[in-house]
Amino acid sequence: MEKTIVTVHGEARREVPPEQAVFTVTVSAVDRDKAALVARINQRATEVTALLDRYAQAVERRETTGLQMHPEYNRRGRRAEAYQGSIATTVTVTDFEPLGELLYLLAGEELISLSGPWWQLRPGSRAGADVRREAVTDALTRAREYAAAVGSELDRIVEIADADAAGGHPMMRAAGFVGGAAEDTGGFDLSPEQQTVEARVLLRVTITEPTLPPA
């Protein structure tokens, strides 16, 4: 005899602390002489590298993510009157304690602009696995409730699948800079924003023969 199949969804949601902070530091300048411009940018970029080296224990990764160099032409568009250039470095930090101080020092340097930090979880974070497990538990609870409503019990699991449209990966939302300058401590007062992790699963189970009450 063919078993009755019950299909349910399970959901779970958590608010967890971020594991990484990402920011971008950009060195940019304008000069009439192209060679002088390259030298200025290189010198400042070297100073940025030296500052990041001082916080090497907090910095997990640094990558050059952008390099631009282009002339600024006169109104007739025939001759370059100046040159503009920039180099951007994206920095990933895992120790948040010195982050405000590091950003404060970088912000005080000439020719430098900052963006971020963006708070996030690591790719493949354990938080994702935990929330998926909770979603499966939620689905099993719902399936048992449906089975009990008709006098049945769970028989076996037929299928467990991610129900997210994006392929079942937990949703990890990142937020930008939170806080302000704290002049007394020589750093920015940062408040890492909690990350929302969500998962949704599809569960199909068979149940024992229902025992329906008499009409």
Image (cartoon, grey):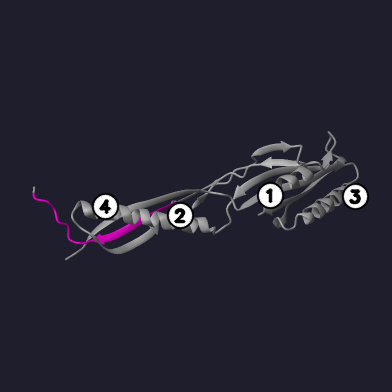
Q: What element carries label 3?
A: helix
User: Percent position (x, y) of residue 165?
Assistant: 44, 51
Q: Which of marks 1 and 3 is in front?
A: 1
What amino acid is found at the position of numbered circle 1 in the picture?
Answer: Glu
Q: What residue would you read off at disc 2?
A: 131
Residue under the point 63% across and 42% down: 191
Magenta region includes residue 153: no
* Residue 97 - label: 1
For marks 3 and 4, give the one nearer the viewer.
4
State which quadrant residue 75 falls in: top right
Q: Does any portion of residue 70 appear in the rendered image?
A: no
Other residues around mark 4 within 10 Å, as few (<14) / some (14–19) / many (≥20): some
Using residue 147 as the reference point, say whether residue 213 is left or right of it.
left
The magenta segment? 199-214
CA gap, disc 2 and disc 1: 27 Å
Q: Sequence-wise, which precedes: disc 2 or disc 3?
A: 3
Q: Could you say where residue 206 lies in the image, as x and y percent from the top left?
A: 25, 61
Q: Which mark, by number, is residue 2?
A: none
